[in-house]
Amino acid sequence: MNKSFWNVLKVSPVLFAATLFAANSALASEVNEQVTNVAQLSQASDSMAQVTSVSQFSDVQPTDWAFQALQSLVERYGCIAGYPNATYRGNRALTRYEFAAGLNACLDRVNELIATATADLVTKEDLATLQRLQEEFSAELATLRGRVDALEARTAELEANQFSTTTKLVGEAIFDVSQAFGDRVAVGGNANPTRDLDANTTFDDRVRLNLLSSFTGKDQLQVRLQAGNIVNNASVTGTNMTRLAYADFTGTSGNEVQIDKINYAFNLSDAVRIKIDANGAELYENTNVFNPDFRSSGTGAISRYGRFSPIYRQGSGGAGLTVTFNPKGTFSLTGAYLAPKASSPNDGFGVFDGDYAAFGQIEFKPSKQLNIGIAYAHTYDGGTTSPTGLASNNVNFTGSTGSAFAISPFGTTTATTGNHYGVQATFQPNSKFTVGGWFGYSNAIAESGVNRGRDADVIYWAASLGIKDFGKEGNVLGILFGQPPKVTDNDDAAREDRNDAYHLEALYKVKVSNNIQVTPGVLVIFNPEHNDNNDTVYVGTLRTTFTF
């Protein structure tokens, strides 16, 4: 500001302090924020309210240095506005535009007083000062009026063409090029492979559109549309150990659009979060899986097993209820009940008569650097066929990870009860490195057929390393190594894995922009199906993920 302005302030320092407070009101703050964010303009009109007494401000005290000046502006001129929560926020930094906006509000009020023959409330000194201030800020006031007029026009256009006042659209599209390599198609047990592994290069896609609605600001209704044609390449490699993270389809979908997920999450209180899934319930989307860099199918690991422990795949596909207590605390507890066949009323199906998973997890988060989780799941899988005849429901004891014996310890149609135990942890020594891992043990019990009463033990483990900003800011180098689910002991000796398979995965997530990620990666399976007669199988992939 020039020297003349400071001379003006000498006329009435109290008036300057008052005007400064006025310019620091919610009105000036909102106008300035609107300039940088047009989308918020429509909300600005509800963010302030005229007050008639300075006592209405909870954050203004009689001991404040400008209390009397603010009281004068409120009670003499009535040109002070506050926030709906009864605060004034007088300690914010002030810009010239904000000062001009507050000054303009008081000038308008003074003009009203003059027009209504109450000008005797305004002293000649005040009017002289206000006139000089108005002249000093005439350019800023003119600029501000023009910008606000333009913003009002643009906001009106946005309101006329907006999709919804409660719903956001969040999308993800994956393009994938991949191919499996190896000498022979893997087989289970101690058998010898006989067929050549003959795989072609594929180009696939998966698209997801999420409609996320909020009605209170603390809840969320999710409706997800999905289409794609990325299939499980186990049909050419002979093992689910080579399955990609985003291979969600059977090969018959042909990019048909499906509503694959509907759920609603809300806070019962500040310490209780509840999520109700109508379909597509998945534990790994409802709780912490302790593998933050690799958990996502679109931007995480390239393999299904590399994303997280198989214990989080129990009960997937149907309805569910998940409750988390103290989600932001050092200790938190999650309980869930999932029913994959909840939508069918037939015998052996439904919420309580069919397949289910009862899950519980205790999380210990002493710091941002260290997170530890202990999980348990009790499951029942009937191994039956859908009454409509449209879908097969074979036993899937380990969520389509590991060997064929681990997935169906007693056969694909033998009803199986399971007790699953898992320990997971993540450690971040600094902002660049993340070390994670898990160990799991499951006990399977046959509930039908010739194996009824027999049991089997399954184990699995893995470790992961993520290096952020590797080569370039935003890029992530990832390495994962472990052993997919293996049947270590089975009363049905013919379905016991004899050797050890190992999973090695390397990937490099390249951040092209905030909305595009390219991930080259390679997956190596040693002794697939836990059979050392099998040759090593390789899967190379190049995944491009678009988010919007």
Image (cartoon, grey):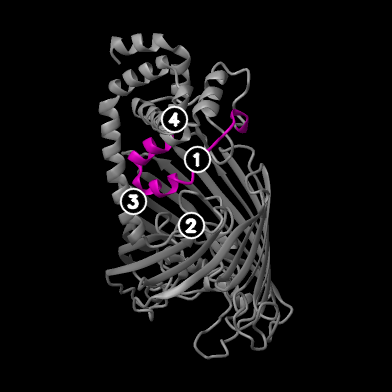
> Of helix, strand and loop, which mostly describes the magenta segment?
helix
Identify the residue under disc 1. 48
Residue type highlighted by circle 3:
Thr
Q: CA distance from mark 4 to mark 3?
A: 37 Å
Left or right: residue 513 compared with residue 17: left
Task: Work out whether residue 215 or residue 471 is closer to the camera in this orientation and state it.
Answer: 215
Residue stretch rendered in magenta on the structure: 29-56
Q: Position of residue 274 (x, y in %)?
A: 64, 59
Q: Is residue 92 above or below residue 205?
A: above
Q: Is 61 or 456 nearer to us in this picture?
A: 61
Q: Which residue is mark 2?
A: 307
Image point 52% across, 69% down: which residue? 262
Tag in front: 1 or 4: 4
User: Mark 4 vs mark 2: which is more N-terminal?
Assistant: 4
Q: Which mark is residue 155?
A: 3
Q: Which residue corresponds to the image point at 47% horizontal and 61% vertical from the top-left?
A: 212
Numbered label attached to residue 117: 4
| CA neighbours of label 3 inside 10 A, class few (<14), some (14 to 19), many (20+) | some
- Quadrant of res 27: top left
Give the amino acid at mark 1: Met
Sequence-first disc among 1 and 4:
1
Q: Say whether residue 75 is visible.
A: yes
Cα distance between the residues tagged 3 and 2: 43 Å
- Do callouts 3 and 1 mark residues in contact (Cβ within 8 Å)? no
The quarter of the picture where residue 466 lies is: top left
Q: CA distance from mark 2 to mark 1?
A: 47 Å
Q: Is residue 219 magenta?
A: no
Please tell me whether residue 79 is drawn above or below residue 130 in the rendered image.
Answer: below
Foreground label between 2 and 1: 1
Q: Which mark is residue 152?
A: none
